[in-house]
Image (cartoon, grey):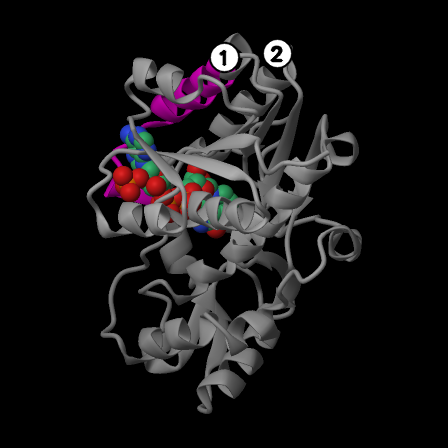
Amino acid sequence: MKYRDERVLVFGATGQQGGSVANALRSHGWQVTALVRDPTTDKAKALADQGIELVRGDLADMQSIEAAMADVYGVFSVQPSSGQGAAYGVTDEDEIRYGKAIADIAVANGVRHLVYSSANAAGATKTGIGHFDTKSEIEEYIRGLNIFSTIIRPSAFMEILTLPGMGLEKGEFAFFMKPDQPMQFIAVEDIGKIVAGTFADPAKFGAQTIEIAGDTVTGAELAAKFSRTAERPITYHRFPDSLLDQNAFLGGLARLVDLGRLAGNANIALLRSQFPGLLTMDEWLAGAGKPALLSAIQAGSGEVALR
Ligand SMILES: NC(=O)c1ccc[n+]([C@@H]2O[C@H](COP(=O)([O-])OP(=O)(O)OC[C@H]3O[C@@H](n4cnc5c(N)ncnc54)[C@H](OP(=O)(O)O)[C@@H]3O)[C@@H](O)[C@H]2O)c1
């Protein structure tokens, strides 16, 4: 199949996942439309500069989604979540409504392939964390619709490791896993690689739910990798119990890591054979991760920015 004339509508293209997907699809020759809230922002203009068509719209405005979806072959669906704090003011109910509405409108418009981005902790049973249980509900809804779909479940992004508040500025990195406990991560740019590969081979990846990650590292391994990259000692410890006890959200995430649900169960060897070039943590730290790490080390201390 030649995709040059086929068009994919990408949601969230001014953000991390959508941006990665729009970029990867475009570079593989797809026609790409991005639904953006404001076409005049620098991020939107950068998409247009890559030959990506911009349509103005909003997840809260169903008519704008219907208009954007006319005559598209495929849709990449991702929603902001309550897990991103006040960034978008999205409730769990909003996320569910948006995710289901995009799927419904895709069905109504005869979209041939819907790729929905969920999260690795989603699944058949509740996690107790709002922005994971939302995704389980959207996944289940999509599976019940008459549409050809692929659901990807990304692990934690490598990019979140350099968010403020995890001690890098003091050389004492803290995160959810115990020092010897492995956890999976994915570089955001690899989400685009995987989604482009999925759209390119619907026979292989359609009607599947695929957990995705690029590497598995323990806390102690992360500290060693950070130390090598920054050329200074960085130690590792798990977030202190006092923080996890007093912050129900962070405590809940730590519990899911301990249960294995958020630590990740992706088959990375298989993913590497299907989607060549997925970044290891070392490769990410040799590229985009290095400036992010160095700037986190130079930043002032602050509260944990993970929400
Ligand atoms: N961080 C992780 O480790 C991780 C792992 C797995 C899954 N996730 C999930 O990933 C999702 C977030 O993806 P991301 O990190 O790619 O998001 P992001 O970088 O924060 O970008 C959010 C995108 O959504 C757009 N948007 C926000 N509100 C909108 C609205 N009302 N109408 C239309 N577009 C709107 C934003 O557009 P503007 O430019 O207009 O603001 C932006 O393009 C969440 O559901 C999260 O739970 C995260």
What percent of the width, then of the height, locates residue 260?
A: 65, 48
The reply to whether discs 2 and 1 touch (Cβ–Cβ < 8 Å) is: yes
59 falls in the magenta region: no
Q: Is residue 98 magenta?
A: yes
Q: Which residue is mark 2?
A: 145
Asked if residue 261 can be seen in this view, the reply is no
Task: Relative to 283, say whether 253 is above or below.
Answer: above
Among numbered discs 2 and 1, the one appearing first in the sequence: 1
Vertical order, 157 against 166 (above or below): above
- Indicate the secondary structure of the residue bearing disc 2: loop
In this view, the residue in front, 91 or 97, is: 97
Of residues 173 and 27, the one drawn nearer to the viewer in this rendering: 27
Magenta part of the chain: 84-105
- In the picture of the structure, the residue carrying the numbered disc 1 is 104
Question: Residue 126: horizontal and vertical position, in percent?
Answer: 56, 28
Crowding near pointer 2: few (<14 within 10 Å), some, many (20+)? Answer: few
Main structural element of the magenta stretch: helix, strand or loop? helix
Percent of width and height locating residue 242: 38, 58
Q: What amino acid is labelled 1 in the image?
A: Asp
Q: Can you see residue 189?
A: yes
Instruction: Pick out the residue farthest to the left.
Output: 40
Ligand 1's image quarter is top left
Is residue 204 toward the left or the right of residue 67 in the image?
A: right
* Element marked by disc 1: helix
Residue at x 58%, y 31% (from the top left corner): 115
Amino acid under disc 2: Leu
Is residue 112 found left or right of 18 in the rendered image?
Answer: right
Q: Give the Cα distance between marks 2 and 1.
A: 8 Å
| Residue 162 spot, x, y in % from top left | 40, 67
